[in-house]
Amino acid sequence: MQARFDSCLDGLLPDGGAVLLAVSGGIDSMVMADLAVHSSTSCRFEVAHCNFHLRGEESDGDETFVKEWSSTHGFPFNKIDFDTREYADTHGVSIEMAARELRYAWFSYLCSKEGFKAVAVAHNANDNAETLFLNLLRGTGLKGLRGMKESSFINGSDTARLIRPMLSFPRKAILEYATGNGLSWREDSSNSNTVYKRNLVRNEVFPLFEKINPSFLETIAADITRFDQAGTITDDFVAVHAPKVARREGSGLVIDPLKLSGTPHWEYLLYRLLEPYGFNESVLDDLIRLIDSGSTFSGRRFFSNEYVALTSRNGIEVLPIEGSFRQGAAVAGTTIYPARARSAGSSCHSSTCRSKCEVLGTGDYSLNGVRFAVDEVEVSDPRQPQGTTVINLRFPFTVRPWQPGDWMRPLGMNGRRKKLSDMFVDLKLSPEQKEKALVIADEGSHVLALVGWRIDESVALTDALQAIRIRLI
């Protein structure tokens, strides 16, 4: 293992230099640190430790352990404290994503300030395989199948290198090295918590794979190599054809649908063009159907968290929501709003803090991966068919994703308040349905309708009423 570690470092950093070792105290990073101690390369090592303060005394114990190890082995010790939960709440991200963003921002800062050639992290072959399967489960293109690279740049930096000299080592080999060499390490109690998807894959799924194929990690590693080769081919394809069908305008993009549809594999090319702007699969499918159908093209709007795609005679115009539109600026029948600002301590998850739109008139809309049609109807029957909301309301009104704390007084409950989270249980909605649930907003957390399911008694229908109908499509 030592020879392979040194060979990897020599290949990644042939001229040596200062390397920052990201050491948590766990077995992977402690093996990496021990290999650095005995390395024959010309690299000079320092240790970096992040205290995320997520496990109380256990987190502080990790810091003490790594600090003492660094002192014993003569490695300079760099450390930082993070209020990870506050950062996650303020930025609307998961705890895992918050920790990732915080540590990599600090690593990038240290590289810039102290002149480190690279930051070495202890990702191994198991981590690489876990990442591949997690990407598959959440939906991914070839990019998500290509795996981690032994060398890349830290997000947001073109100078701070991230290296993974342990990437070829399976966790089993790391454990054998640690026990065989009498190393000490810290066990993270959260690693056994299968609430985290990665732990579930690691602790329950992979043991089953190993029963089916004891060499499944080697098989996956070989597949990752082939996926990476295929990804390089598709990158070359996009590099050749993208300039022929699209042009950048400011921080947005304009796509010519006629030139696009005349290009081989144009559906994939459209996916790659839209990928940087955060549009989901639902939007991609809608645009493909629209281009394929030959029907009326102009006047459609599709939203991601930060961008809107407008179809017009100029093509598909991808524009930033904030910056290109002032808040409340009307665009083709829709007022576009940035996501609601969030304060520290908010319980809102990132999935419920997406863009919202104010509906000024009839038409088709797409928000949070959900398409809905709005029209005006004469109503004599007050019943609400599933998937359709008929409401005593006038334009404009705001549609947004539901948020924890939302409540309404459902029609038929004699004025009693009910939280939407409780209504989801009563309606037996699936996790995906809850994730994509839309509401018609009123003031604060009071909502006028759970679109497609229930309405508030304040907007109940009366006889012979001209009402608004919203249909999920």
Image (cartoon, rainbow, N blue to C red):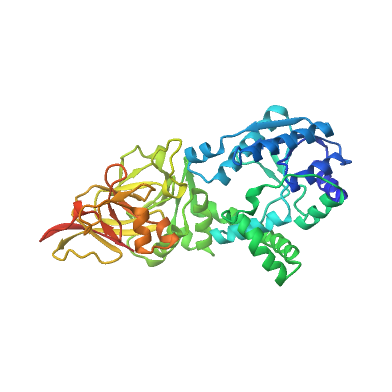
Q: Residue furthest bottom?
A: 212
Picture quadrant of residue 343: top left
Question: Residue 434, position in %: x, y?
Answer: 40, 57
Does the image show residue 213?
yes
Residue sitting nearer the eye, 214 or 20 = 214
Question: Residue 116, position in %: x, y?
Answer: 74, 33
Does the image show residue 237?
no
Q: Residue furthest top?
A: 113
Q: Residue at 64%, 38% (x, y): give it.
A: 57
Q: Residue at 44%, 60% (x, y): give it.
A: 432
Left-right relation of 259 to 472: right
Q: Residue at 88%, 49% (x, y): give it.
A: 3
Picture quadrant of residue 376: bottom left
> Measured along the vertical axis of the image, is residue 6 above or below residue 422?
above
Q: Residue furthest front?
A: 57
Q: Residue at 56%, 35% (x, y): give it.
A: 83
Question: Residue 137, position in %: x, y?
Answer: 56, 61
Residue sitting nearer the eye, 66 or 235 = 66
Question: Residue 231, position in %: x, y?
Answer: 64, 58
Residue sitting nearer the eye, 290 or 49 = 49
Q: Quadrant of the C terminus?
A: bottom left
> Measured along the vertical axis of the image, is residue 430 above or below residue 95?
below
Residue sitting nearer the eye, 281 or 354 = 354
Left-right relation of 442 to 422: left
Task: Count numbered badges in the picture.
Answer: 0
> Measured along the vertical axis of the image, is residue 426 above or below residue 115?
below
